[in-house]
Image: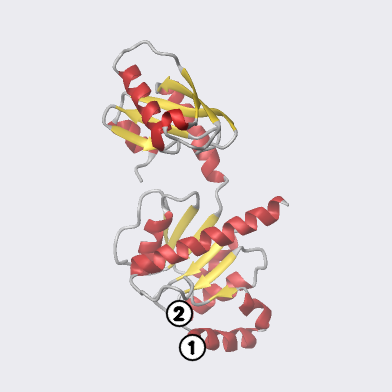
């Protein structure tokens, strides 16, 4: 996904479309934004004819037409949508002030995203980083090697550190750890640090049932016991899909992470 600064840099004439109010069932909630340029879009307000109307309205504004800065849209059969609610949309040309407001708002939203630390920037680690990059997560990819197998995506943090296991202590409560390194001994060091904490939403490790059994013995020797093992997802990605290609594993783990982090957030909210 193109970052906001990159989109604005390549589309200097842009209209901000925002869902300002909603009533009943709607595709997206109030506060959702989309940027519309003559030849580009950033974000979505839910698709369908509602979005088509919004894009058309924004581009007519860009063309210099004098139009209302607000649209009140009923989401019924007359526009081919069956949500049944109503959405109020606002339209603003993006100038320096709007750009600053947008940047501050998105930075505040990003700061509240759950944290995910991915240890290991091999083929699977990079595939997972790319899968997680567009999601509402703060992702850090960590590796200890001087060279990795590709380029991390924009929008995530990449760290090259000598002792990856020490980074676990930096995580906030409710975060997730995914362990995919090139070294089984390092996997165990990282997992030991993660499982010593009881406030993480997810600790997962790539591997097999044999690796899990080996790690169970390792935890016993370290005094962490079987309760810690129960908090370890190993192997990651579930067992429904057997395809071991990095992109497939990444998709399965991304779904697993979203489920774990959403559950942790719901539990915290109650």
Asked if residue 209 is positioned above or below residue 158 in the image, the reply reads: below
| Image x and y of residue 216, in percent | 58, 86
Q: Secondary structure at mark 2?
A: loop
Instruction: Judge left or right: residue 194 versus residue 138.
Output: right
Q: Which of the 4 image quadrants contains residue 99?
A: top left
Q: Which residue in the protein does label 1 denote? A: 210
Can residue 121 be spotted in the picture?
Answer: no
Residue at 37 percent of width and 36 percent of height = 42
Can residue 177 be spotted in the picture?
Answer: yes
Q: Which of the 4 image quadrants contains residue 262?
A: bottom right
- Residue placed most toward the observer, 140 or 228: 228
| Image x and y of residue 261, in percent | 58, 58
| Image x and y of residue 156, in percent | 42, 52
Near mark 2 (Cα within 10 A), the count class, few <14, some 14-19 or many ≥20, is some
Residue at 50 percent of width and 52 percent of height = 138
- Residue placed most toward the observer, 69 or 77: 77
- Residue at the extreme left: 39
Asked if residue 175 is positioned above or below residue 179 in the image, the reply reads: above
Q: Tell me whether circle 2 and circle 1 mark residues in contact (CB < 8 Å).
A: yes
Near mark 1 (Cα within 10 A), the count class, few <14, some 14-19 or many ≥20, is few
Residue at 55 percent of width and 32 percent of height = 85
Asked if residue 216 is positioned above or below residue 28 in the image, the reply reads: below
Q: Tell me the distance, in whole angstroms, between the alpha carbons under discs 2 and 1.
A: 8 Å
Instruction: Judge left or right: residue 204 versus residue 54.
Output: right
Instruction: Judge left or right: residue 155 versus residue 238.
Output: left
Q: Which residue in the protein does label 2 denote? A: 207
Q: Secondary structure at mark 1?
A: helix
Asked if residue 217 is positioned above or below residue 134 in the image, the reply reads: below
């Amino acid at each position: 996904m193109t970052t906001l600064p990159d989109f604005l840099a390549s589309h200097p004439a842009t209209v901000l479309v925002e869902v300002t109010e909603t009533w009943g069932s709607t595709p997206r909630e109030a506060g959702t934004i989309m940027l519309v340029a003559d030849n580009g879009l950033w974000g979505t307000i839910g698709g369908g004819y509602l979005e088509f109307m919004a894009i058309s309205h924004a581009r007519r504004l860009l063309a210099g037409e004098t139009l209302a800065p607000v649209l009140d849209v009923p989401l019924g059969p007359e526009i081919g949508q069956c949500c049944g609610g109503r959405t109020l949309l606002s339209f603003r040309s993006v100038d320096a002030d709007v750009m600053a407001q947008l940047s501050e708002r998105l930075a505040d939203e990003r700061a509240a995203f759950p944290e995910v630390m991915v240890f290991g920037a091999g083929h699977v680690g990079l595939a997972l980083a790319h899968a997680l990059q567009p999601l509402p997560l703060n992702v850090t990819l960590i590796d200890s090697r001087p060279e990795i197998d590709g380029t991390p995506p924009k929008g995530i943090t990449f760290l090259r550190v000598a002792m990856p296991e020490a980074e676990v202590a930096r995580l906030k409560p409710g975060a997730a750890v995914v362990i995919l390194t090139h070294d089984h001994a390092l996997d165990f060091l990282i997992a030991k640090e993660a499982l010593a904490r009881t406030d993480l939403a997810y600790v997962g490790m790539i591997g097999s049932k044999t690796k899990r059994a080996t790690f169970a013995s390792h935890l016993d020797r370290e005094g962490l016991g079987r309760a810690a093992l129960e908090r370890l997802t190993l192997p990651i990605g579930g067992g429904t899909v057997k395809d071991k290609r990095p992109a497939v594993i990444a998709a399965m783990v991304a779904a697993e992470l979203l489920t774990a982090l959403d559950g942790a957030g719901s539990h915290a909210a109650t």
